[in-house]
Image: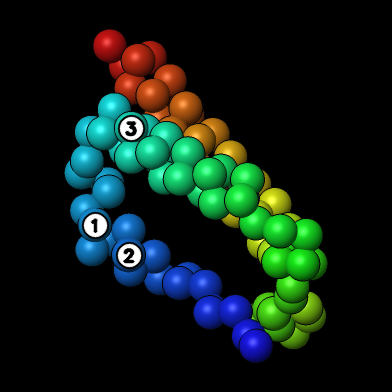
């Protein structure tokens, strides 16, 4: 099995019009999706945690636990960018 390739063009972000969505709405959606993800993780068994699929770009196996660590780090990246945007907007006021 192979993971889906990353959307390096960010087409889903553009189609969802995230750049024009209020930050409060983005954060609310983010919280809901992260909560749903955590609920899924709480219910997976050990066998699923250790399943792997080939990473399409790195050509190396990635376990379920590796994928969720990657997702968490990616989320943190977005939260840091949002914080940066908020600080910049507040500084301009």
Q: Is residue 4 left or right of residue 58?
A: left
Mark 1 nearby-residue class (10 Å; few <14, some 14–19, many ≥20): few
Q: Which residue corresponds to mark 3?
A: 28
**Colouring chosen for the image of the structure:** rainbow
Q: Disc 1 on helix, strand or loop?
A: helix
Q: Quadrant of residue 16?
A: bottom left
Residue most extreme to the top: 93
Give residue 16's mark: 1
Q: Disc 3 on helix, strand or loop?
A: helix
Nearer the observer, 11 or 64: 64
Q: Locate residue 67, reporting x and y percent.
A: 67, 62
Tell me which label, 1 or 3, sits earlier in the chain: 1
Residue at (71, 66) in percent of width and height: 48
Residue at (47, 39) in percent of width and height: 35
Question: Circles 2 and 1: CB distance less than 8 Å?
Answer: yes
Q: Locate residue 5, reporting x and y percent.
A: 54, 79
- Give the position of the C terminus as an image quadrant: top left
Q: Nearer the viewer, mark 1 or mark 3?
A: 3
Q: Locate residue 55, reporting x and y percent.
A: 68, 78
Q: Which residue corresponds to mark 2?
A: 12
């Amino acid at each position: 099995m192979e993971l889906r390739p990353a959307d390096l063009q960010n087409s889903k972000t553009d189609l969802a019009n995230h750049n024009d969505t209020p930050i409060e709405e983005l954060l609310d959606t983010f919280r809901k999706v992260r909560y749903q993800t955590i609920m899924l993780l709480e219910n997976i068994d050990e066998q699923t945690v250790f399943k792997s699929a080939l990473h399409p770009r790195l050509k190396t196996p990635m376990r379920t636990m590796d994928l969720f660590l990657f997702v968490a780090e990616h989320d943190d990246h977005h939260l840091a960018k949002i914080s940066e945007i908020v600080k910049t907007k507040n500084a301009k006021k």
